[in-house]
Image (spheres, rainbow, N blue to C red):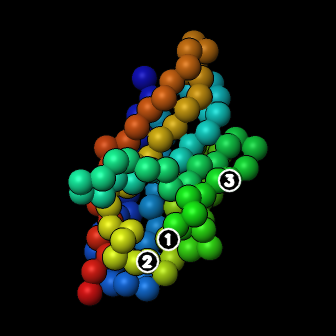
Amino acid sequence: QVQLVESGGGLVQPGGSLRLSCAASGRISRFNAMGWYRQAPGKQRELVATITSAGSTTYADSVKGRFTISRDNAKNTVYLQMNSLKPEDTAVYYCNAKGYSSAWLLFDQWGQGTQVTVSS
């Protein structure tokens, strides 16, 4: 069983910054990719950023140049540094991890979500 625990959300003014963290635990043989998604009220969940085990990254066009995803493989942790935040970034942010368990079974696990609110 793989668990993801997110932290770092909160209330921030427009133009401010936040850093989200997602720590993975459990019997894990290998991560393929970890990422962040978000869901605003009344909207579908959308991809924000992903990072592979090799360090390749992808970003949604709406966050390019403002958000940076990174990971610490030794700690099984992925981070999302969010700068120049806008009100439209307000959403629940979810961590996602894909990989193989210790039994070499594929997993696709979600965190519980953390609220990010950008407002003056």
Residue 57 numbered tag: 3
Disc 2, SS: loop
Q: Residue furthest left?
A: 42
Q: Label 1 belongs to which residue?
A: 82
Q: Is residue 102 above or below residue 17?
A: above
Q: CA distance from mark 1 to mark 2?
A: 7 Å
Which label's residue is closer to the chain start, 2 or 3?
A: 3
Q: Disc 2 vs disc 3: Cβ atoms closer than 8 Å?
A: no
Q: What's the residue at 64%, 48% (across, down)?
A: 51
Q: Label 3: how many residues lie within 10 Å, few (<14), some (14-19) or many (20+)?
A: some
Query: What kind of residue is marked 1?
Result: Met
Q: Disc 1 vs disc 2: Cβ atoms closer than 8 Å?
A: yes
Q: Return the x and y of residue 22 as percentages of the image width and height.
A: 46, 50
Q: Return the x and y of residue 64 as percentages of the image width and height.
A: 60, 68
Residue 81 seen from this side: no
Q: Where is residue 99, by image quadrant?
A: top right
Q: Is residue 82 above or below residue 45?
A: below
Q: CA distance from mark 2 to mark 3?
A: 20 Å
Which label's residue is closer to the chain start, 1 or 3?
A: 3
Query: What kind of residue is marked 3?
Result: Thr
Query: What kind of residue is marked 2?
Result: Leu
Q: Is residue 79 above or below residue 26?
A: below
Q: Label 2: how many residues lie within 10 Å, few (<14), some (14-19) or many (20+)?
A: many
Q: Disc 1 vs disc 3: Cβ atoms closer than 8 Å?
A: no
Q: Return the x and y of residue 114 as percentages of the image width and height.
A: 32, 55
Q: Label 2 belongs to which residue?
A: 85
Left or right: 39 with respect to 23?
left
